[in-house]
Image: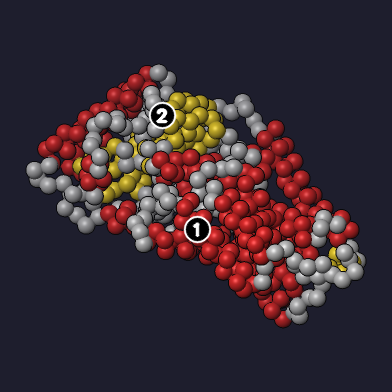
Amino acid sequence: MTQLIALLYLVAGAALIGLVPRIAVPPAIWVALTLLLHASRSMPAWPGQAYLWLVLYVSAAIAYRGVIPAPDPIYFVICAFITTTVALPFVADRLLAPRLGALASTVLFAIAFVAVEFLRSRFAPPATWGSIAYTQFGFAPLMQIAAVVGIWGITFLVAWFAGTAELAWSRGFDWSLIRTPVITFASVLALVVLGGTVRLALARTDRASMRTATLNRPTDLFIKGEMTRITEGRVTAEDYPQLAAKTARLQDWFLEGSRREARAGARLIVFPEGNLLVFATDEPTFLERAARLARDERAYLAIGMGTIHLGEQRPFENKLVLIDPTGQTLVSYHKTHPANDWEAGIMRVGDGRVPIVDTPDGRLAGAICFDADFPEFIRQAAQGSADLLIVPVNDWLDVKDLHFQMHAFRAIETGVPLVRAAASGLSSAFDPWGRVLGVTDFFAVGDRTLTVQVPMGRVRTLYAMTGDLFAWLCVAGLVVAIGVTTLAPLHVGHAISGRAVAPHGAVAPGSE
């Protein structure tokens, strides 16, 4: 292969991988990784890996614009970090794969991809944002593997496909040379898809349900930037009367909407994250009114609210308050994971525990927005035998589709149905198998209220018990592979089905 053709494959692969932070197109990432891996193995390690990093960086800088809310040049530094983490599995492949047999080399790339993606999610600010697993939203049978090993199983299969497809490509699709790795991968993928299909087919549809409604704020009450200014506590004495009057009208809006939906049959009404703003001095009065309404209408209120403490260094309490039909406050949870530096600078952080409470209608759990992007954190809901997970969120236009899709995987992992009320995003609900029960778009014309019957009760999953064990095994596997291949001599060829095959990108003499 000429270097020009390899570069064209790099560009095509990078263009497809640029869809990852935008929208789920399941086949695209399978093709993207295959193209990138084929090009990476076809070029000299240097400058081949430099070219790979460069095209991935350009792709990231374009794709993440608007998704990552950071000013230049910080934005470009973040893109460089993301690019490096995506490129590392390719570097590991170039350094280690030539010292392994064909089957092992295909698995190595998958192990490396999972290890890097998982470690990035655990020790870097983006959490699981950017995981290629989320691109498989809509491929429901494959999504079910998240109930067994988390999203890392999906990442593993996609990367393993790329390693296997590239091996077949570089060997000219000679069946005698590629039989073992191709059959091995195809058998595993078929088992996963078949298992997922059976899991969906056996999913119960006769579960007790709770009629749930999500509300949203009026779009014409505040001028642009006004809600942000209130949240930051930047309210002067001169501004206070006017802004307090607006927040009072906002509170009336949500209470009136709650009464309307309760009388229409809703048993649970959910407000989006930080959508209900209230000054700390007014909070007791508002909560008393909310409790009275819940008691009068015999409904649960799950209130995503922002309590503002004027004059304090961290003025913002980002809370989920759950009031039961007797008017009792069951939960007052503070968000644990700030979404970015802006929020971290003004927000009072929670205690790191998912609240779970018993009610006559089941065990209810809650989290707020970015909290739900941490699978290990949300796993607490399953460990606490929650029957429903309530997640108020606050999105923006560029991320509304992807963030909505990400939360389907939390429902599958935990086996807990999930309802999300979104400010500036997609309010939605998922059953324990990640199937969409209902959705409404804040940016669409018309009523932004979502009404949906949410099945109550969780489904047991292996992931709820073992957590990220599979991902940690991939990390360990990569460490072992580095150690073993460092000591092992470079193979002149790989033994596949009794025939000699040269290292990647070349064909052994006599096999043409």
- Tell me the kind of residue under disc 2: Ala
- 463 over 357 or under it: above or below: below
Residue that appears at 27% across and 27% down = 253
Left or right for 378, reference 309: right
Q: How many numbered discs, if any?
A: 2
Could you tell me which quadrant the C terminus lies in? bottom right
Left or right for 274, reference 85: left
- 347 over 216 or under it: above or below: below
Dot 1 crowding, Cα within 10 Å, few <14, some 14–19, many 20+ = some
Q: At which x and y percent is residue 176?
A: 89, 58
Residue 111 in view (yes/no): no
Say which element carries label 2. loop
Residue carrying label 1: 58
- Foreground residue among 127 and 293: 127
Q: At which x and y percent is residue 74?
A: 37, 61
Say which element carries label 1. helix
